[in-house]
Image (cartoon, rainbow, N blue to C red):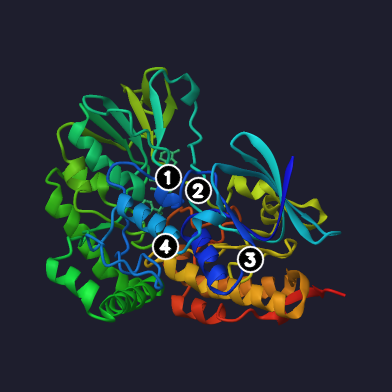
Amino acid sequence: MTMIDVQIAIVGAGFSGLGAAIKLKENGVDDFVVLDRGTDFGGTWRDNTYPGAACDVPSQLYSYSFAHNPRWSRSYSHQPEIHRYINDVADERGVRAHTRFRTEVELAQWHDDEQRWYLDVIRDGEREQIRAQIMVGAVGPLCEPNLPDIDGFDDFDGKIVHSARWDNDYDFTGKRVAVIGTGASAIQLVPELAKVAARLDVYQRTAPWIVPRTERPYSAAEHWAFENVPGFQTAMRGVVYAANEVTAFGLTYSPKSLKPVEMICRANIARSIRDRELRRKVTPTFQVGCKRILRSNDWYPAIARRNVDLVTDRIASVTESGIATTDGTIRDVDVIVVATGFHVTDSPVFDKIVGTGERSLSGVWDEIGMQGYKGSFVNGFPNMMLMIGPSTGLGHTSMVYMIESQLNYLVDYVRTVRAQGITRTEVKFDAQRAYNAEIQHTLRNSVWVNGGCASWYKDHHGNITTLWPGFTFNFRRITKRFDIAAYDVERRR
Ligand code: N01
C-alpha cells in the first residue's frame, strides 16, 4: 500500500478546502495535499446540479475577497457559474497540482504515540494511506444527502433522485413526478420541473417563508466598471455585506422587526396565488426567520399551475407505483425527487474521524452535542482543524466570509506551530465549554430558538449548534490570531 507523508492533509476541495490550500501556499507552506472524492473543485457547487440551482447570496459577496470575478453575469449567480469560478481560481492559484481527486477518505485516525493523523483512503479503487501532522476537515456541512425515513423506498419501481445527486441524463419531459420537500433546493427545482413534467406532486410538510428574489443581469456599464474602476467590486461587496449584517442581526433578535418581512412574504403569496385554499396551504405557521428565509419569484406561480398539486397530507409510505399519504390516497409517479436536505448534525463523516482514546467525533458529539472552539477545533481531536465547524453557519449572508475568517485562524495556527516547534495542539475542554455556553446564552433570545419551528439548525440535544449567533465581523475578530492560551500544546524536545 502506498504511504504518503505530508505536513497537512486537507480533506475537501470546495470553497473552504481550496481557500485553505491557497492561503497556505501564499504563506510559504507547500507541504500539503488536498483530497476529494469528486473529479474537480467545487464541493456543494459541483454536486448540486439540479435545474435552477443558484445561490441566494449576491455574487459579489459569494466569492473570495482575494479573487474578484469581473465576469459574474448576474447579481445572484447560478450553479454552473460558481462551479466554473471555483475551478478557475484553483487553476490560477496552482492548487490542482496539490490535489488528489477520486479519493475517498474511509477513516481518519489520530495516533497519539506518533502525533500524526493516519488517513485510510481509496483512490481510483486502490488503497492508500496518508500520514499528516495536521488534518484540515473541509468537507462542508451540506455534503451528505439525507434520505427521509419513509417506508418503501426500496419497493418503488420508478426512479429516485436526490436533489444533490442529480441525474442530468434523465429526461423529465412528460413524466409524472413527485418532489418531497419544500426547502431551498425544492423551491429552485420545482419551477423548472413544472415546465416539462406531465404532472408534478409536491409533498410539503412545512410551508417556508419566501421573499421575492431581486436577481438581475449585470449591465454592460457594470461589467466595464468591474474591469476598469479600481475598488468598484470591493465597494459593492462592502455595501451588500453591511446591508446583510444590519438587517439580519436586527431581525434575528427582535420579533417586532420581523413583522415587515412577514408582510413582504404574505404579499408575495397574495400576488401569486388566487385560490384561497392554496394560499392557506402555503402560508407558514411559524415565525419568519426561524428557518432559512427563501428567495423566489417563480415558486408560487409554479405551485399554482394546473399540472402541479401541492400535497399537504403526510406521507405514509412509498409504494411500488408511487406515494401513499395518510388519507389513503396513492399517487402513481414515474420518478421521485427527494429534496430533503442533508445530514448536518448527524453526518456519517463524523463516524470516520477518530481522535484520542479511539473516540469518534460522532461518539463525542452524541454525548456533549455538536461543540467546537471557534468553529475550528474540538477537544479530543488534536491537530485537527474543521472548516465550517460547529456554530459557524449563517442564515443571511455569505459563508465565504466565515470561511475567510477561519483561513486567518488556520494560517496563524500553522505559523505558530512552525515557529514554536509545536507537535501537538488540543483545545482545552474548559475553553471549548465556556465558548459554547456563551453562544447558547446569546442564542436564547433568537428567533431560531423561539420561532416555533423544527429545523436542521438544531442538534439532537435541541441546541442550535450550526449557526453563528451574532455579527460576522465579530467572528472575524476572534479568529484573527491563533490564541494559544486556549490550547494544551506539546513542543519538540
Ligand atoms: O434542504 P432543507 P434543502 N417528509 O433541509 C422536507 C442550502 N441551500 O436541500 O421543513 C416530508 O432545507 C423538509 O420539511 P420540514 C441552504 O443552506 C442553499 O432544501 O423539515 N418532507 C424540508 O421542506 C439550505 O438551508 C441554496 O418539515 C420532508 C425539505 O425536506 C440547505 O442547503 C440552495 C421529510 C428539506 O429542506 C438545505 O436545503 C439550496 C419527510 N420525511 C440549498 N424530511 C442557496 O441558494 C424532510 N422533509 C445558497
Compute the Cα span from label 2 to label 1: 8 Å
Residue drawn at (48%, 51%) of the image: 142
What SS does tag 4 mark? helix
Can you identify the residue that label 3 sits on?
A: 372
Compute the Cα span from label 3 to label 4: 33 Å
* The disc label shown at residue 92, or none: 4
Q: Residues within 10 Å of mark 4 (few under 14, many from 20)?
A: few
Residue type at tag 2: Cys
* Along the line of sight, the residue nearer the viewer: 283 or 399: 399
Q: Earlier in the sequence, mark 2 or mark 1?
A: 1
Q: Is residue 413 left or right of residue 221?
A: right
Q: Earlier in the sequence, mark 2 or mark 4?
A: 4
Can you identify the residue that label 1 sits on?
A: 47
Residue type at tag 3: Gly
Asked which quadrant contains residue 124, the reply is: top right
* The disc label shown at residue 143, or none: 2
Compute the Cα span from label 3 to label 2: 19 Å
**Which callout, 1 or 3, points to the residue nearer the camera?**
1
Q: Is the residue under label 1 in contact with that under label 2 (CB below 8 Å)?
A: yes
What SS does tag 2 mark? loop
| Image x and y of residue 256, in percent | 32, 74
For ligand 1, tell me if the residue under mark 2 lies within 8 Å: no
Q: Residues within 10 Å of mark 3 (few under 14, many from 20)?
A: many
Compute the Cα span from label 2 to label 4: 25 Å
Q: Is residue 388 left or right of residue 211?
A: right
Asked which quadrant contains residue 235, the reply is: bottom left
**Which callout, 2 or 4, points to the residue nearer the camera?**
4
Q: Is the residue under label 2 in contact with that under label 3 (CB below 8 Å)?
A: no
Q: Earlier in the sequence, mark 3 or mark 2?
A: 2
* Along the line of sight, the residue nearer the viewer: 60 or 447: 60
